[in-house]
Amino acid sequence: MDLNFALIKNAIPLLLQGAGITIQITALSVGLGLLIGMLVGVARLSTVKPVKYLSNVYVDFIRGTPLLVQIFLVYFALPILTGSRIDPFVAAIAACSINSGAYIAEIFRGGIQSIDKGQTEAGRSLGLSWFQTMRHIIMPQAFKRIIPPLGNEFIAMLKDSSLVSVIGFEELTRRGQLIIARTYASFEIWLAVAFIYLIMTFTISRFVAYLERRYQVK
């Protein structure tokens, strides 16, 4: 079978536009997920039982259900409750952020628990509040340790973001589907899509490796 390189060349600009949207979705989702995960991760370590219980329910539910189902819940089920249609972009970001937040919560929880308890006791002995101790002593140390898993979460979300194509959002995978519907060149287009994903994930993994070396815990 001969590859139609001319067709791939013509499709690349459209696919790169889709890749840009994929990166945008991933960055926004992981960024918001980082905020959600930080709060939920701390809540899971809380001594206040209702707070700990609710955070556990959130993490268990999100990690126990597929992202595809969560996208359907946000895009199709939520409008039934609200009575108004949700924009595909908003639905994609909301579902992916909520999903990412649950996994990042576990990353933060593990990172915080990896810090010796003596660090917290030292902070409190210096007159720092619990919040000040977390902000100035625990979190800076924990963040260095969670860089690799955070990088893995970013890469995982980059690939999982292809699922938003089911609601018609034109990221990289959806752009590939539309080009194939017009050209019937499945092999060439999917090969190009795969290589673009590979380039993005490889670049991110190298950047994460650089950050890991720079902030290596000694």
Image (cartoon, helix red, strand yellow):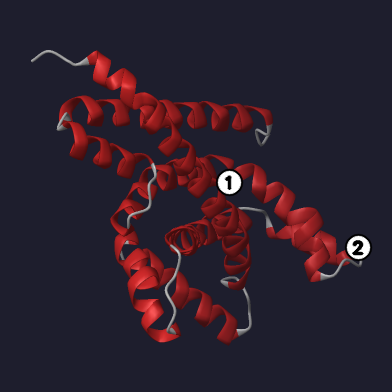
Q: Nearer the viewer, residue 179 or 80?
A: 179
Above or below 23: residue 5: above
Which residue ends up furthest to the front in the rendered image?
182
Q: Position of residue 39 (x, y in %)?
A: 63, 67
Q: Amino acid at mark 2?
A: Leu
Q: Residues within 10 Å of mark 1 (few under 14, many from 20)?
A: some
Q: Position of residue 160 (x, y in %)?
A: 36, 48
Q: Position of residue 110 (x, y in %)?
A: 54, 56
Q: What residue lies at 19% left-to-right and 40% top-to-bottom?
A: 181
Q: Nearer the viewer, residue 152 or 98?
A: 98
Tell which tag, 1 or 2, sits nearer the viewer.
1
136 horizontally vs 16: left or right = right
Q: Nearer the viewer, residue 186 or 181?
A: 181
Above or below 202: residue 83: below
Which residue in the protein does label 2 denote?
A: 126
Kind of element beneath mark 2: loop
Q: Quadrant of residue 78?
A: bottom left
Above or below 204: residue 155: below
Q: Amino acid at mark 1?
A: Ile
Q: Nearer the viewer, residue 110 or 36?
A: 36
138 horizontally vs 27: left or right = right
